[in-house]
Image (spheres, helix red, strand yellow):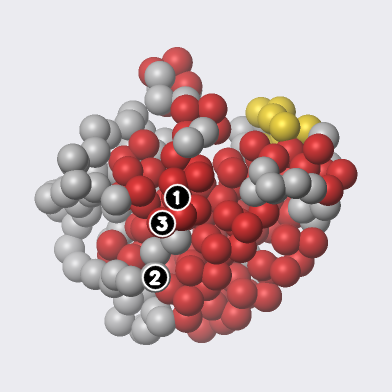
């Protein structure tokens, strides 16, 4: 493919998230995250499942029926499970897949290149969730976030017709702070409140 090939975005985002998961300790698993459906452990399980679902997307299948959390993986093995799936998933992103169409959750057909951005965006925002839960910073894939932001309204529309659909797991977009960097702005687009209070109300760390 040419210079518009988006696969570098997937590479940058997954490498960053893999490093984040590698740093998780036993004390982190029960921490709340800005994604109020998941604590750190279940979010890590979801990220492993996202890679499984993404592999199905680019293999020509519909990932909608697949589990949203990785099953049969011990908590201690989640970091390895995520890292091991990256090259497997990446290999499904062939030139043919990117120039055709794919089905992304929840059953939406998009151009293959857009599908890479859609799936990478979800992984990036959940990486932001993990980093925020741990108070970690550094190494954020800001260039990738800029690229995803450029098509954010196409891959995850901000309008209520999309966000209020019960099948869509994203809250309405949040207005970013003037000084927000690209990854924070992307998280805001996906409905995350990135300035205090960030974590779910009533949650304990």
Instruction: Say above or below: 72 vs 60.
Output: below
Which residue: 24% across, 69% down?
A: 135
Distance CA(mark 1)–CA(mark 3): 5 Å
Out of 44 and 138, give the one closest to the viewer. Answer: 138
Give the mark, 2 or 1, whose residue is nearer the N terminus.
2
What residue is disc 1 on? Answer: 145
Instruction: Say above or below: 23 vs 102.
Output: below
Residue 126: image x %, image y %? 43, 55
What residue is disc 3 on? Answer: 142
> Going by the picture, which residue comes out furthest to the right?
96
Which residue: 30% across, 81% down?
A: 27
Out of 123 and 47, give the one closest to the viewer. Answer: 123
Q: Mark 3 touching mark 2, by CB under 8 A?
A: no
Out of 19 and 151, give the one closest to the viewer. Answer: 151
Distance CA(mark 2)–CA(mark 1): 12 Å
Tell me the element at label 2. Answer: loop
Residue 176: image x %, image y %? 24, 38
Mark 3 Cα-neighbour bin, 10 Å: few <14, some 14–19, many ≥20: some
Residue 61 in view, yes or no:
no
Which residue: 73% across, 60% down?
A: 89
Tell me the element at label 3. Answer: helix
Residue 158: image x %, image y %? 40, 25
Disc number placed over residue 3 in the picture, else none: none
Tell me the element at label 1. Answer: helix
Distance CA(mark 3)–CA(mark 2): 8 Å
| 204 relative position to 189: left or right | left
Which residue: 69% across, 47% down?
A: 3
Disc number placed over residue 139 in the picture, else none: 2
Mark 2 Cα-neighbour bin, 10 Å: few <14, some 14–19, many ≥20: few
């Amino acid at each position: 493919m040419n210079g518009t090939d988006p696969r570098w975005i997937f590479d940058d985002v997954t490498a960053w998230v893999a490093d984040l998961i590698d740093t998780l300790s036993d004390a982190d698993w029960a921490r709340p995250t800005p994604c109020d459906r998941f604590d750190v452990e279940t979010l890590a399980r979801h990220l492993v499942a996202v890679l499984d679902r993404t592999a199905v997307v680019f293999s020509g299948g519909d990932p909608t029926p697949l589990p949203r959390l990785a099953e049969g993986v011990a908590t201690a093995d989640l970091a390895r499970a995520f890292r091991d799936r990256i090259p497997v998933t990446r290999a499904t992103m062939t030139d043919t897949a990117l120039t055709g169409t794919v089905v992304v959750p929840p059953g939406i057909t998009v151009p293959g290149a857009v599908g890479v951005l859609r799936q990478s965006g979800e992984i990036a925002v959940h990486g932001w969730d993990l980093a925020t839960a741990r108070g970690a910073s550094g190494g954020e894939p800001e260039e990738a976030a800029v690229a995803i932001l450029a098509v954010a309204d196409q891959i995850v529309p901000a309008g209520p017709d999309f966000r209020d659909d019960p099948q869509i797991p994203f809250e309405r977009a949040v207005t970013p702070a003037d000084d927000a960097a690209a990854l924070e702005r992307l998280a805001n687009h996906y409905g995350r409140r990135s300035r205090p209070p960030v974590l779910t109300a009533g949650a304990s760390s």
